[in-house]
Amino acid sequence: MELEQILAHPDYQALQRLRRRMSFWLTFINVAVYSLYVLAIAYGHDLMVKTWGDSAINLGLWFTGAVILFSVALSGFYIWWMNKKYDPLHDSFLHRFNAEKNNARSQQ
Amino acid sequence: MKRRLCLLSISALPALSSSVWAGDAITGAADKQPLNVTAITLFLLFVLTTLGITIWSARRSRSRDQLYTAAGGITAWQNGVAIAGDFLSAASFLGITSALYFYGTDGLLLIIGVMGSWPVILFLIAERLRNLGKYTLVDVVSFRLAQRPVRLLAALSSLTVVIFYLIAQLVGAGKLIQLLFGLDYIYAVVTVSTLMMVYVSLGGMLATTWVQFIKAILLLIGGSVMAFLILLHFQFDVQQLFTEAVATHPRGDRLLAPGGWIKEPMAVVSLGLTTLFGFIGLPHILMRMFTVKDARAARKSSFYAIGIMGYFYLLIMLIGFGAVAIIMHNPAYHDADGNMLGGANMVAVHLAHFLGGDLLLGFVAAVTFATILAVVAGLTLAGAANIAHDLYGTFGKRGHSERAELFIMRLSVLGLGAISILLGIAFQHQNVAFVATLALAVAGSVNAPILIAAMYWRGLTTRGVMWGGVVGLLASVGLIILGPAVMVAAMGYAEPIFPYVYPTVVSLPITVLGLWLFSVTDSSSRAVAERRAFDQQFVRSELGIDAEGNGKLRLPFGLQQY
């Protein structure tokens, strides 16, 4: 059965593992930063009002701006990684798998 | 999101200076404003353009694929703008600006909620959703499970979210339009509903996407102009902006400290959970993933969307705190008692008037109207797809034709429009703030965990989804009724039984527990087959082969052999 061949194919396993790791760690980092922000708003009132010099812009505002930019940057990194690293492997796996199957068929 | 804003304000009401929310535009009485000619002209222009697009789309909306998903013909960047448009509702623009203006830092939670949840959609959901589904998120949930019960439950849960969101938007819209345009509430609700029915039933997803796209561009222009004029006002010195905001606001430097809005830390955590999961489970936004050609385009559109939202939310920070510094003590925008004219949601509108006179005011008002229209159109389309594709498609006459389903779909649009008008009128003088809470809480407590489990957890079975979904629905709805939004604000009790506005901190774990418990104890032969089918589903979600699921194989490049 084709499904079992795909599942057993070392290239598919490598591909799948690569993507799983990347999605997991990026999600983890993103949720960790988000949780940190929510917890800081909930419990870290004193920390969030820290200012530097005579500027009125406090840590909370910097943190907010940073989380916004960080979310965009993290998403940008994922897109870049998927386009540059994952997609070529994905395409070449499908090509190779297909070629192997055709070979097997022609040998029969 | 506007409803959410008002709702939270209710939970924090005792701690507020009573004047702030006395004239609230949404929950309180709204004074009719004089007819605003600029706004109406600009809005008519928008309506004419979008109706033209609808006529053009109608000829391209004759099949199921076209009507539900524009046959996957939307490009990634157009879809990205449209997704951002769905998030940047009137509530984001007016509601978050007002939250920053009155409460300061806590209002930023609403921004970070979106920015925190959207990358999760990108990393975990977007591409696999596109690979597994056809028209709705219910397709994905029911992929390897028993079609009839799972579709029924998931479609009902999705419809609950859509209908409550729709009512919340419409009642808010009616009051807002009354304020901005000087139109009667009933005319406003009927106008919005009628236009929405025309867009969706004739133009389908293609028209709905274009309406959202144009509106998002207009909103971005409006926001950018306002932020630029604010920076100009402070000679591009952002420090100065915040220094003056702190000096002006009655709370002084506490403006920039957390705790101005939601005192209870656990309530903050529950709101954080609700936004994180709630935005993942919104049916009308997930549906946009099916309007692009493949998983890679879905991925790209998600990135465009978060880029645009990030930009706009940075603008909102400038606009919200800039408004404090600029118009807080301006007598032109306040009555003799110091209340804001037209209510608390008018901050951005007054600021637009101060910065750019009647022209910018008219532009912002027209864009707000357009925004409401675009968002309700997307919601209606998602709801109609649930009824026609998920419910009629599964429970309707066996072997029904595509034409019959399209007829049901258009009928559902009219039905949803009629329901919205009736409920909109019925709820005119009610406090409907809890309705939007309900929508987001159900999306976060039921839709999101079920969707994620269906995609990633091999052990999930039909029984798990049914029981998990039912207890999750009961828990989220029940706790909202027992919470401050319904018991205190709507029913008038002094103390709620459940202390937080958002039930998610309890209802989400209940759903997850239900999904797990009723799945692992399920040893039926159906469950065994469902677990076995996970591999096939996962391979398809990973590789994107056979993406149409109907025998017609669609490969990312010219392979024909699968």
Image (cartoon, rainbow, N blue to C red):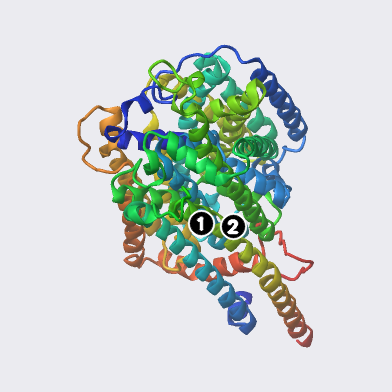
Please tell me how many numbered marks the rendered image carries. 2
Image-quadrant location for residue A20: bottom right
In the displayed structure image, the side of residue B237 where residue B260 appears, left or right: left
Res B508 visible: yes
Viewer-proximal residue, B486 or B231? B231
Q: Quadrant of residue B29?
A: top left
Residue designated by label 2: A72
Position of residue B250 in the picture relative to residue B1 (left or right): left
Determine the image quadrant of residue B106: top left
Residue at point 68%, 45% (across, down): B65
Q: Residue at x 31, y 63 (%)?
A: B517
- B47 relative to B277, above or below: above
Nearest the eye: B146 or B455:
B455
Crowding near the residue tagged with mark 2, few <14, some 14–19, many ≥20 C-alpha atoms within 10 Å: many
Question: Which residue is nearer to you in this view: B496 or B6?
Answer: B6
- The answer to which of B338 and B8 lies nearer the viewer is B338
The amino acid marked with disc number 2 is: Val
Residue picked out by circle 1: A67
Mark 1, other Cα within 10 Å: few <14 / some 14–19 / many ≥20? many
Residue furthest out toward the front: A54
Badge 2 element: helix
Amino acid type of the residue tagged 1 in the rendering: Val
Measured along the vertical axis of the image, is residue A49 above or below residue B405? below
Q: Is residue B22 above or below residue B465?
A: above
Q: Nearer the viewer, mark 1 or mark 2?
A: 1
Q: Which chain contains the residue that carries disc 2?
A: A
Query: Does the rendering let one see residue B117?
Result: no
Residue drawn 45% across the image and 68% down it: B458
Image mark 1: chain: A
Q: Which mark is residue B330?
A: none
Residue B142 location, x and y as percent?
50, 55
